[in-house]
Image: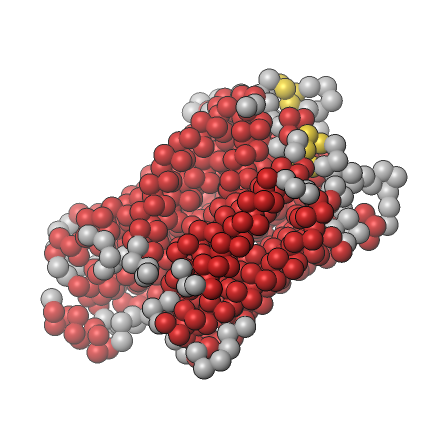
Amino acid sequence: MSDLLAARFQMGLSLAFHIVFAVVGIASPAMMVIAERRWRASGDSIYLDLAKRWARGTAILFAVGAVSGTVLSFELGLLWPGFMRVAGPVIGMPFSLEGFAFFTEAIFLGVYLYGWDRVTPRAHLLAGVVVAVSGALSGVFVVIANAWMNAPTGFTLAPDGSFTDIHPLQAMANPAALSQVVHMTLAAYAATGLAVAGIHAGLMLRGRSALFHRHALIVALTVGAPAAVLQPLSGDLSARFVARHQPAKLAAMEGLFETRDHAPLAIGGWPDTTAQQLRFAIEIPSGLSLLAFHEPSATVTGLDQVPRDEWPNIPAVHLSFQVMVGLGTYMAFVGLWGVWLVRQKGASIGRGYLRALAWGTPFGFIAIEAGWMATELGRQPWIIYRVLRTSAALTPMPGQPIRTAAFVVLYAFLAVVVTVLLSRQILGSPVTGDTAELEARR
Amino acid sequence: MSLPLLLAGAVLVALNAYVLLGGADFGGGVWDLFAAGPRARGQRELIAHAIGPIWEANHVWLILAIVLLFVCFPVAFARLSVVLNIPLTLALFGIVLRGAAFAFRSYGGDRDAVQLRWGRVFAVASLTTPLLLGTAFGALASGAVGSWSNDPPRAFAAAYIAPWLTPFGVGVGLLTLACFAYLAAVYLTLEADDRQLSEDFRSRALLAGVVVLVVGGPPMMSATPGSLVIGVATVAAAVAWWALWTRRYRLARVAAAGQVSCVIWGWALRQFPYVLPPSLTIEAAAAPAPTLQLVLAALALGVVVLVPSLAYLFNVFKGEAKR
């Protein structure tokens, strides 16, 4: 394995690991606050139990997310010093703001977790709200920094490769920022909300204490379902951005080798890069032109317009994109179904819907990983699109595969730790005695 | 005062906060490792209890310092990341394992075997991480990072290990470890409910205070003879020791924090005006002015939000500390 590939693998692994925690850190405080609010309003102690469990879950994931985030802030330099040297001053602003948002989140999470008996009910709920808002904000800032790598603005590139005339605010207002921020924030709520709802649906199907899981499911759906329903709209915004600014990425996502008008939308299939054609795909005539430019006759740039040495890994980008879209579509349907069920007062949640939810438990997280693979692999071979190649940013230090292997072991270990902790503390139902007591208290 | 200088000061403030707060968490881990005597269990519980609510906030200071460094002094950050890749990577492993162990101990249930196993991980990582971070700082201070060049290419060990694995570097690593353990012991005298536990940490603090002077004294003295900071540090050290001896723990805490802060600021003043001695100055390494202005504005905003929040956090959880 080359140093470059090893470094990319390590960065990808670190990000893929961290994003799970970042995403849950954005959405689970919202669930915990809603549960606490319902408990305070109704006195129903199941909601209190839920708020405490979710707060504990948030804390575990936050603790691990904080260290994996620390790792990332170092890795930017350890792996890509050539990137940080030029990009630091341009996109440092969102990173600094993220630092503060994260700090605020850490402080108020401390108050929330350990302050049940130490601060007033109002202050406690408010601390939860601050955790939820600052968690969402820190995600927004990081995504803005990533968006800049796709649509670099706010500087002038000097002939020697250095950046002059730097405007950090212009860099933050880059054309990719809005679509990426909306897409990622919705993804966080949809993935976490539907995953939690799915877990509880699964437990209900196995006949575990219905009332507790029903409460949990409703709160989780409240957070996840609307986001899942809105996500396809935001996907449309993203697709149109990519079509205009990163034609190579769109062509790779769709496996479009030939530039053409009335470009079809390809579903599935396998891009054969030697023969330069997409095999076995279902094609919807003019679908891609319509989606990308809202115009059936629009011309969509194919890979034939992209120099061969600037091609991303087409099969990987295509596959990731297809997985994301497929799972996202499923989630939008489940979300819509859920919104409809909840709006019908008194309607019971049938086994059919519980099964649909339970099946979809991991889909949101798989879709997020796949979506990031599509956008990051789709930007290659650039680390800053059309400005700096990833290979030029790499650390000069040899022996990267060895360090990467060590990180793989470390992350595998961390994954086991987190899984054990969560399954032990959060996912389990209240034991039977507790449940009977809880149900009696109703 | 110039803009780059102001932001270099901000990096140093974040670093100072990390040492005083996060450093004490590391030190707590060290005392967890060396918990002994009839009250070993009580000592461990006190450490965990003291760290719990403020753990996350304490460790964000490091992220803040790193982010400010790469935004405001990108050249220096890139160079540090290349030359000190190995100690920083190893320190990261320590940070990750410690964080995981902390999560497990706090939320993983109360079975003794589990607690003990994770306690060991926590404690060992608490020992190695400050050692490595300190060694990296030693390499920076010695000028090895600033004067580093790999043109023509040298052997791996000469280019990536020799710059930091020096007696001076390791000495600074040991000093860092000693300072962290010292801070933790001094803070813990005040945290303890139990008088005997308080006494346990008092004796540890006195011992660690001597170690800090033995390990840190000679290099500091030889580096900056007669400077004001050394004078202040010496006075603070004496006050801290006297306060511990006479059980004035509040005063001891302030004095010990002042003493350790003096070490940091003394190091900074010694290498002024360089960010990477012997030749890269703060001004030369700084990002363009528009970036620095905006970061300064963000810092001001951050201070407005964070200072009251932190004050609230510490007031809620540390407000009832005794004596």
Residue that appears at 22% across and 48% down? A123
User: Observer-nearest residue: A80 or A152?
Assistant: A80
Q: Nearer the viewer, residue B27 or B155?
A: B27
Q: Is residue A56 left or right of residue A372?
A: left
Residue B82 place in picture, x, y as percent:
71, 43
Across and down, in percent, residue B178 comes to 59, 60
Quadrant location of the C terminus of chain B in the rendered image: bottom left
In percent of the image, x 65 and y 41: which residue is there?
Answer: B226
Up the image or down, A432 lies above or below A194; here it is: below
Using the image, determine if residue A361 lies above or below residue A271.
below
Residue B265 placement: quadrant? top right
Residue shown at 46% from the left, 77% from the top: B40
Q: Position of residue A329 (x, y in %)?
A: 39, 45
Q: Nearer the viewer, residue A98 or B119?
A: B119
In the rendered image, is residue B264 in sight?
A: no
**Outermost bottom residue:** B38
Residue in the image at 41% along x and 63% along y: B247
Is residue B15 shown left or right of residue A312?
left
Rendered-image quadrant of the N terminus of chain B: top right
**Vertical position of residue A282 compared to residue B200: above or below:** above
Estimate the x, y position of residue B267 in percent, counting from the top left.
Answer: 63, 43
